[in-house]
Amino acid sequence: MTESTTHHGTGPDHGTGAVVVVAAALLDGGRLLAARRSAPADLAGRWELPGGKVEPGERPEDALVRELREELGVEAVPGERIPGEWPLKPGYVLRVWTARLRSGEPRPLEDHDELRWLARHELDTVDWLDQDRPAVAEAALRLPAARP
């Protein structure tokens, strides 16, 4: 999902000229999906929200659906855009949408070696990539609180 994903195109955001990287706060059963990076080496072992670069002429929501199909083997439906925008490397910006599964069971097909469904109280049990942390915090607000 990060700017280091090199197999995708570079869809510029016409407002800023930045390449938009989309990510999904994939929600299911009161949990959020976390994906552990397997590559590149400097990101391997850390966790992120899955996604990738928007290709030229592609709508961000369509890129999100495509990326989840490629990376996880699922069909998903984009929901609301999570407020905010987070800089990645120079010229790249991260935008996050909520999403729900339409069909399939997520599997780590590209760029990841493990997936975990995390409840709200479990979100701090993985080492999130720094740029994903604010979006994860926003996504947490959409998850049910832990029951006492």
Image (cartoon, helix red, strand yellow):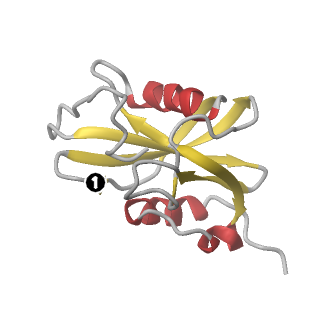
Q: Secondary structure at mark 1?
A: loop
Residue at the bottom extreme, as displayed: 148
The three-letter amino acid code for the residue at tag 1 is: Leu
- The percent coordinates of residue 6 (x first, y second) are 33, 35
- How many numbered marks, from 0 up? 1
Of residue 86 and residue 46, the one placed in the foreground of this image is 46
Q: In x, y percent, where is residue 114? A: 65, 51
Quarter of the image with the C terminus is: bottom right
Tell me the quarter of the image containing the N terminus.
top left
Give the farthest residue toward the right. 148
Percent across and percent down for residue 40 are 40, 49
Which image quadrant is residue 132 in? bottom left
Query: 91 and 109: which one is in front?
Result: 109
Asked if residue 5 lies left or right of residue 64, the reply is left
Circle 1 packing at 10 Å, graded few (<14), some (14-19), many (20+), is: some
Q: Residue at x 42, y 37 (%)?
A: 52
Along the horizontal axis of the image, is 142 left or right of 18? Answer: right
Task: State the residue at coordinates (28%, 54%).
Answer: 88
User: On screen, 102 above or below 139?
Assistant: above
> Where 128 sits versus 91, above or below?
below
Residue at x 52% of width, y 60% of height: 45
Give the residue at mark 1: 88
Q: Residue furthest top?
A: 57
* Left or right of 13 in this view: 61: right
| Image coordinates for residue 85, horizontal then vertical, percent | 32, 53
Q: Nearer the viewer, residue 6 or 133?
A: 6
